[in-house]
Image: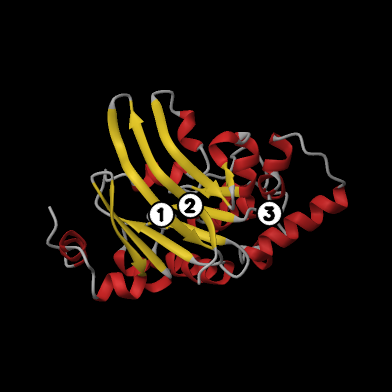
């Protein structure tokens, strides 16, 4: 039996009066990669943002239902604590432009006023950059700005920044859509390696990517969770006609 780390229960999300997600109940399993796919505007990113409460930064958003990390309802926790445990990487690489590589990695500690000794911070930076497969490329340039890196390196720096807080879950919103094929391949290999130590949930438009790297796949359409299951089964024998049409490019 799979070990559930994060789950939603009857989750509804509204932008003003308009429903963006309707009654989504889904389990995310520990040390697995789950991909969320579906056409544009179907609620994928909204669902992802609910999982660490970043959706609350939009004032018109209202949420009903529950989201549990283990047995704790994250909607009743301090959002800062939630975002430490559930990290987020966005579509476009966004290193903090005024910070060097070293400070980018430990930005979460600085922004939250968490005091650490210099030696501890050094260890966090090295460990996080190694986990993001970036250490050997930047270890002599830690005091240069993160913006001098290539797009793929910048995205791995953003992954290192999220990993520095020791999250249990890592959320990624189309993390390779702005990258070239070689950088995309590096990120995919990295995510498969990272799932040994962190649970990964990725929103992707790229069906081939979902097929290559994810263990579980959710298909969303117009705010509904249409289908969810092991990736191989969803891709080869989908239960829902809408899923099949999406996978075979007959959608819309």
> Residue tagged by mark 2?
7
Q: Residues within 10 Å of mark 1 (few under 14, many from 20)?
A: some
Number of numbered discs overlaid on the protein picture: 3
Mark 1 or 3: in front is 1
Q: Residue 114 falls in which quadrant of the image?
A: top right
User: How has the structure been colored for display?
Assistant: secondary structure
Q: Residue 3 falls in which quadrant of the image?
A: bottom right
Distance between the alpha carbons at the discs numbered 1 and 3: 24 Å
Distance between the alpha carbons at the discs numbered 2 and 1: 6 Å
Q: Nearer the viewer, residue 246 or 110?
A: 246
Q: Nearer the viewer, residue 201 or 27?
A: 27
In contact (CB < 8 Å): disc 2 and disc 1: yes
Q: Nearer the viewer, residue 162 or 236?
A: 236
In contact (CB < 8 Å): disc 2 and disc 3: no
Earlier sequence position, callout 1 versus callout 3:
1
Q: Position of residue 128 (x, y in %)?
A: 68, 59
> Residue tagged by mark 1?
26
Q: Residues within 10 Å of mark 2 (few under 14, many from 20)?
A: many
Q: Position of residue 198 (x, y in %)?
A: 60, 62
Q: Is residue 174 visible?
A: no
Name the residue at 21% across, 62% down: 243
In contact (CB < 8 Å): disc 1 and disc 3: no
> Residue tagged by mark 3?
166
Earlier sequence position, callout 2 versus callout 3:
2
Judged from the image, the secondary structure of the residue bearing numbered disc 1 is: strand
Q: Nearer the viewer, residue 113 or 96?
A: 113
Q: Is residue 66 visible?
A: yes
The answer to whether residue 247 is left or right of residue 132 is left
Judged from the image, the secondary structure of the residue bearing numbered disc 3 is: loop
């Amino acid at each position: 039996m799979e070990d559930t780390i994060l789950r939603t229960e009857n989750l509804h999300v509204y932008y003003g009066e308009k429903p963006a997600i309707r009654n989504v109940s889904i389990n995310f399993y520990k040390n697995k990669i789950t991909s969320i796919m579906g056409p544009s505007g179907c609620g994928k990113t909204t669902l992802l943002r609910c999982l660490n409460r970043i959706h609350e930064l939009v004032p018109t958003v209202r949420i009903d239902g529950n989201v549990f990390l283990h047995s704790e309802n994250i909607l009743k926790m301090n959002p800062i604590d939630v975002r430490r445990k559930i990290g987020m990487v966005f579509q476009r690489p966004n290193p903090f432009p005024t910070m060097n590589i070293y400070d980018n990695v430990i930005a979460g500690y600085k922004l939250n006023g968490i005091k650490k000794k210099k030696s501890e911070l050094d260890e966090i930076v090295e460990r996080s950059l190694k986990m993001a497969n970036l250490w050997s490329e930047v270890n002599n340039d830690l005091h240069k700005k993160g913006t001098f890196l290539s797009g793929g390196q910048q995205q791995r720096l953003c992954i290192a920044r999220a990993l520095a807080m020791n999250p249990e879950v890592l959320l990624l919103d189309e993390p390779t859509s702005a990258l070239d094929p070689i950088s995309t391949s590096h990120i995919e290999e990295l995510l498969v390696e990272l799932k040994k130590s962190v649970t990964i949930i990725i929103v992707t438009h790229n069906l081939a990517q979902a097929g290559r790297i994810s263990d579980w796949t959710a298909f969303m359409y117009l705010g509904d969770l249409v289908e969810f299951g092991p990736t191989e089964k969803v891709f080869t024998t989908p239960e829902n006609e809408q899923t099949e049409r999406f996978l075979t490019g007959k959608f819309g």
